[in-house]
């Protein structure tokens, strides 16, 4: 089991921070891979320069939306599918980072009862 149960004591601060760093590293890895896939897709399917592909992929992963217009059906389909994917990755990455903090707060609350 990854997290301690209600009957176990609260983790020491150093162990909790290590857990938080591990979750943050996983989230960063997911974001970095997703950014690379988005850049490649915008470059190859939409014909954008690498810097423009980076901008569009980063904006979509950040929840802002694409910049500019897309030429051709392939580029538009990729942009739409990547936008759906980026929304899910944004939520999943956020939850991955917030989960240890929320668990610690709830665990502390249960121990105080």
Image (tube, helix red, strand yellow):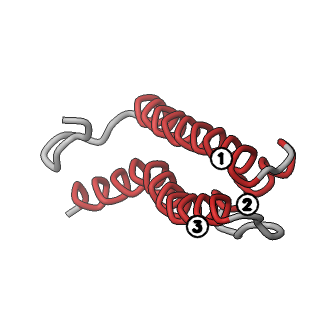
Q: Quadrant of residue 1?
A: top left
Farthest front residue? 72
Q: Quadrant of residue 13?
A: top left
Q: Earlier in the sequence, mark 2 or mark 3?
A: 2
Within 10 angstroms of label 2, few (less than 14), some, or many (20 or more) residues?
Answer: some
Depth check, front residue: 43 or 35: 43
- Left or right: 43 in relation to 20: right
Q: Position of residue 25 (x, y in %)?
A: 54, 34
Tag shown at residue 41: 1
Depth check, front residue: 35 or 107: 35
Q: CA distance from mark 1 to mark 3?
A: 11 Å
Q: What residue is shown at x 33% (from left), y 36% (from top)? A: 11
Residue 83, placed above or below residue 11: below
Q: Earlier in the sequence, mark 1 or mark 3?
A: 1
Say what secondary structure mark 1 lies in: helix
Say what secondary structure mark 3 lies in: helix
- Left or right: 22 in relation to 69: left
Q: Position of residue 7 (x, y in %)?
A: 12, 46
Q: What residue is shown at x 68% (from left), y 41% (from top)? A: 40
Q: What residue is shown at x 58% (from left), y 67% (from top)? A: 80
Image quadrant holding the C terminus, namely bottom left
Mark 2 sits on what residue? 59
Q: Earlier in the sequence, mark 1 or mark 2?
A: 1
Q: Position of residue 72 (x, y in %)?
A: 72, 64
Tag shown at residue 80: 3
Residue 49, placed above or below residue 71: above
Residue 69, placed above or below residue 36: below
Tag shown at residue 90: none
């Amino acid at each position: 089991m990854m997290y301690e149960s209600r009957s176990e004591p609260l983790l020491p601060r150093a162990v909790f921070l290590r857990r938080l760093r591990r979750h943050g590293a996983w989230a960063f890895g997911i974001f970095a891979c997703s950014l690379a896939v988005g850049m490649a897709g915008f470059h190859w399917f939409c014909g954008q320069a690498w810097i423009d592909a980076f901008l569009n992929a980063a904006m979509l992963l950040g929840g802002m939306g694409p910049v500019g217009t897309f030429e051709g059906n392939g580029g538009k389909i990729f942009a739409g599918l990547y936008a759906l994917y980026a929304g899910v990755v944004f939520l999943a990455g956020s939850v991955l980072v917030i989960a240890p903090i929320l668990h610690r707060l709830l665990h502390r609350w249960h121990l105080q009862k």
